[in-house]
Amino acid sequence: MNASVAPDPMLPQPWRVQAVRRETADVVSLDLVPLAGAPMPFKPGQFNMLYAFGIGEVPVSLSGDPADASRFVHTVRAVGAVSGAIAAATPGTVLGLRGPFGSAWPVAAAAGHDILIIAGGLGLAPLRPAIYHVLANSERFGRIAVLYGSRGPAELLFHDELARWRGRLDMEVEITVDHADPSWHGRVGVVPGLIDKVAFDPKNTVALVCGPEVMIRFTVAGLRAAGVADDHVHVSMERNMKCAVGLCGHCQFGPDFVCKDGAVLAYDRIAARLAAREI
Amino acid sequence: MPEPRTQPSVLLGARVLLPRPALQDLIDALAACGFEVIGPRARDGAIVYDRLRRIEELPAGWTDRQDGGTYGLERRSDAALFGYAVGPHSWKQFLHPPQERLWRARRREDGFAIEPEPAPPSRLAFIGVRACELHAIAIQDRVFMGGAHKDTGYEARRRGAFVVAVNCGTAGGTCFCASMETGPRAEAGFDLALTELIGGTRHDFLMEAGSEAGAALLAGLPTRPAGAADIAAAEAVVARTAASMGRTMDTVGLKSLLQDHPEHPRWDEVASRCLACANCTMVCPTCFCTTVTDHTDLAGQEAERVRHWDSCFTADFSYIHGGSVRSSTKSRYRQWMTHKLAHWIDQFGTSGCVGCGRCITWCPVGIDITAEAAAIRADPAAHGTKRGTSHGNP
């Protein structure tokens, strides 16, 4: 098959697991390559539907470098039958893959601004492609900061990269955990508490936010308090997804289908909905 | 579309009379063109849509009595073939089947191979499509064929379908198509439209072709010219139906009325009655939501994905890791009704409601979408409304 011809988006294509990296006790990152052709381009923030043969399919954000055309990287937490089967894949396992689908972090439009990349828990995975892009083009941005929190030290993703990023002079990295253990010497607390720990010009800042919905709500409240305009805040929403192309209805969030209008949505567009319950 | 059986079309837009017995010729002509003909039948105490071969199978002399949570067939005083409103079925079940395999997969040495489901073989002809249902089909056309990704199965079935519409001679107790501007006259989206003219010794259909294919088919049938009196009689049938709607819906400003009041107390009130049974979504001719299930054989060598109708009233519908987004019945009813009457306009440029009344009739507790909309309109500022400036304040 010629990978430049888009396959029917409803039909999974076979991709082989090339490498598996354990990130935490229940999270792995998979490198995937197509059985035929080459990976198609993707934008930071997009996701694929990953299929475990005979078991089922789940949406998983791309977590690799968008400039690396050799493979797709997905970071998966084992929380159910399907994600458990995908997380248990070993090199050589063939998975089905549809997509990439969905909207992207507005990294091009953010050029010329300070950029805050704010992640909670597994939310760092969908943001990592944006971080790669921003760091590869750091001269186009003002100040760059990554704010990241997890439940505990053992749940932090991408340790080595976090350490590398902390060593860079062209960005700030602030990390916090909800609950520390004796090994932890860093900050303890929730992610919104990191906002005033880094330098940025609120009038000229773009913020990218991904994490649990409650973390998003408190983080956006902190950004507003700091003076960042709603239309400069972008969040990635999570909803149930089955088809990924806006036909099955599951992922509706008000008038938006999160699968095709999102998952990345400008906060000013969804503020009222996010404030109401059970939308 | 059928292959022209006779001369090139000469009748597009013109109106002719087809005597009742010649309706059989229409069915036969469609069958001869390779169509599987589907039409209304009286079965299991309801008007349903099923395979139709003989006009004797049509529900002659039946009508229906409909109200909130109420449906029953009754005898008419005449032998009208289309003297009822819509029943629990809609054409959705043929164009967007309740269950459909999307693909099969087979294990191979190098992983597995996916085989797409072949295109549906049969061409369907629908007889007795009401104006509201034409609009419902047009709405699902936008959903499944109007976006960046087209549903290939729907598109194949839809492109092959032949539509014979019926202008309604009877409004049901829960009908409100006149309010939604979707009926009772069939204006577009049909190959042929008929109006039943019955009275005294007369029993004819005033026929109108809406497509070249319809005109070609009509040209082969034993019709006779319609006179001004026939056309006026047909107009009167539709006007009488329009004037006898069982319900009304005020659509002015309805979109923002619902979108701006997600915390209106009426949502709690309706949730105290709603059983979250999903009947309304199953009978709705525009509800399109589906889920998929993946299966394997026992040996784990073959797998398939099957798509089923789903409903936003189930707990599973909005489930993500950690729980359902919409765990309360209030939020599910609000989602359904706000989607239908408001978000749909953002998504597809049209309301998702065609005023057919099925959701009212088939609701086991008789919840009435027109009454729910009216209740919010009556007091939009009721306590707890209008999310204002608290954005982002959790």
Image: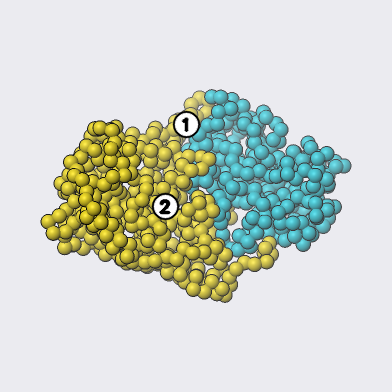
Chain colours: A cyan, B yellow
Front-most of residues B164 and B150: B164
Disc 2 marks which residue? B286
Query: In the depicted view, which residue is nearer to us: B22 or A140?
Result: B22
Q: Residue at x 20, y 40 (%)?
A: B221
Q: Which chain does the residue under circle 2 lie in?
A: B
In the rendered structure, which amino acid carries the disc numbered 1? Ile
Quadrant location of the N terminus of chain A in the rendered image: top right
Instruction: Name the one closer to the observer, B242 or A72.
Output: B242
- Left or right of A70 on screen, residue B306: left
Mark pair 1, 2: CA separation: 30 Å
The amino acid type, in three-letter code, at marker 2 is: Thr
Report helix, strand or loop for mark 2: loop
Residue A87 visible from this viewpoint: yes
Q: Nearer the viewer, mark 1 or mark 2?
A: 2
Q: Residues within 10 Å of mark 2 (few under 14, many from 20)?
A: many
- The residue that disc 1 covers is B114
Residue at position x 55%, y 50% from top?
A: A257
Do the residues bearing badges 1 and 2 touch, measured as CB atoms within 8 Å?
no
- In the rendered image, the residue lying farthest to the right is A169
The x and y percentages for residue A53 are 50, 36
Q: In the image shown, does B205 or B144 lie closer to the viewer?
A: B205
Is B327 left, or right, of B6 in this rendering?
Answer: right
The answer as to whether the residues below labels 1 and 2 share one chain is yes
The residue lying at 28 percent from left, 45 percent from top is: B14
Q: Residues within 10 Å of mark 1 (few under 14, many from 20)?
A: some
